[in-house]
Amino acid sequence: KGLRVSDKGFLNTAVIQSEITYIDGEAGILRYRGYPIEQLALKSNHLETAYLLIYGVLPSKEQYHNFRLEVTRHRVVHADAEGFFRSFRYDAHPMAILTSAFAYLGSYYSEANPSLQGQKLYTKGDAESLEMIDRQIYRLIGKATTLAAMAYRVRQGREFVIPPSHLSYTGSFLYMMDHMGEENYTPNPVLEKALDVLFLLHADHELNASCTTVLQTASSLVDPYSAIAAGCASLYGPLHGGANEAVIRMLISIGSPENVPAFIQAVKKREKTLSGFGHRVYKTSDPRSFIVRKTADEVFKVTGRDALLDTAMALHDAAMKDEYFVRRKLAPNVDFCGLIYRAMGFPLDFFPVLFAVPRVVGWLAHWRQMMIQEGGVKIWRPRQVYVGPSKRDYEPIDSRA
Ligand code: CMC
């Protein structure tokens, strides 16, 4: 009583206060803990930025060393998990595998499961419970790359690769995917760096659908592995993390630049979706899209230019000039990075995984912020306005019309 549906789709509802990520959608500004994304992309790396997002400050040398060590040593996945991965069909979508893998992983770590422990995960002032929270964070960031590489290799019927400890976060990820038993194999440094920049760009984006899902799920005090699995499920959709895959499918279906005008007309008639355009928060170009473009130039010098680029450019130019898109303030978002993933040789359906792995960092930064917040966690339980039938009496099946 007295309730009204106020904001379908949460267009203008803030559900938390957060110190993590700042976005000004009108001005096209993105900052992690106050640092502009452009500076971080140029000068930092994914793991250092992960530390920043989670703990709020850039690490000292010692803090960075220890954080890197913890993440690195937590990458190994128990050998029993091989059977789990091998149970998927050869053509299973890797996001289906990854989503399930996070929930599966949680079954190994009862220490993070309050239902099994019969207590809260975190108690204020209790250093051990904070260490326990941080241990799950190292573990999830570390194992995210290993699970993703396993999802990649299992579909090719290949053996799994033990994470190497001598490479960077993205370097070892590429190693686990690409390694075919060659001696002295190292990933191409330009591609390793490009992937690191893309990981950093994807590390957090405040309360998007998947982060909200993680927090909503975690608010019941479920273990973080289940919450991350829920986040992956939300990310999988084509309006969110699935858009980078959808962009390439769209470009392939358009075929060549001369078909762009007809495609734009179909979008305006709402027969087609222009994936990679539009954003709930940005009403101008997504600042990450400029860094994506610069990174693409570096990658194409190594891999060669992707033929789909001409269609992508024609589409971009046509949409940016078209009154339909201008009036609605629709501009490119981060998802044209699919062109880079394609040039690097990743299979199309693996692209959302390349979004999920780095986003684990942002989800965990928000999860930690929520767990240790002043006053403890309150379960997220929105209300609804019921508009169904009023009371009626049950009729046995034989007497129903
Ligand atoms: N192509 C054509 N029209 C669009 C598009 C698009 N890509 N995006 C929005 N519109 C139109 C929409 O039809 C609506 O028009 P009208 O007011 O006449 O009905 C208007 O623009 C406002 O759009 P909306 O759908 O109400 O905006 P939203 O904030 O609810 O949705 C969005 C945001 C990202 C889901 C949407 O822009 C979209 O579907 N984009 C394509 C998918 C995509 O690229 N998603 C990735 C988002 S960025 C990375 C991430 O966060 O995952």
Image (cartoon, rainbow, N blue to C red):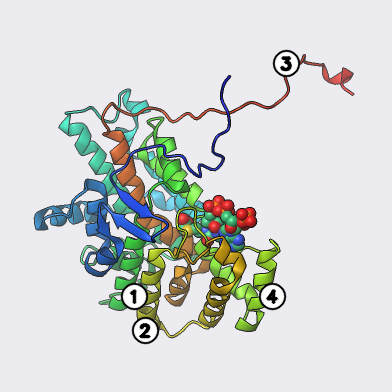
Q: Position of residue 252 (x, y in %)?
A: 60, 75
Nearer to us in this view, 68 or 110:
68
Q: State the separation of the CA atoms marked 2 and 1.
A: 8 Å
Nearer to us in this view, 79 or 318:
318
Direction from residue 157 to residue 2 in the image, left or right: right
Q: Mark 3 points at which residue?
A: 391
Residue at image position (26%, 30%) is 374
Q: Find residue 272 and report its image quarter.
A: bottom right
Quadrant of the drawing holding the N terminus: top right
Q: Name the residue under label 2.
A: 302
Q: Which amino acid does label 1 sit on?
A: Leu
Q: Position of residue 145 (x, y in %)?
A: 35, 58
Q: How crowded is mark 1: few (under 14 residues within 10 Å), some or many (20 or more)?
A: many
| Rendered position, 167 above or below 259 | above
> Is the Cβ of the residue at disc 3 closer than 8 Å to that at disc 4?
no
Residue furthest out toward the top: 393
- Closer to the N terminus: mark 3 or mark 4? 4
Q: Name the residue under label 4.
A: 262
> Is the Cβ of the residue at disc 2 closer than 8 Å to that at disc 1?
yes
Q: State the separation of the CA atoms marked 2 and 3.
A: 68 Å
> Is the Cβ of the residue at disc 2 closer than 8 Å to that at disc 3?
no
Does dot 2 land on a helix, a strand or a loop? helix
Q: Which of marks 3 and 1 is in front?
A: 3
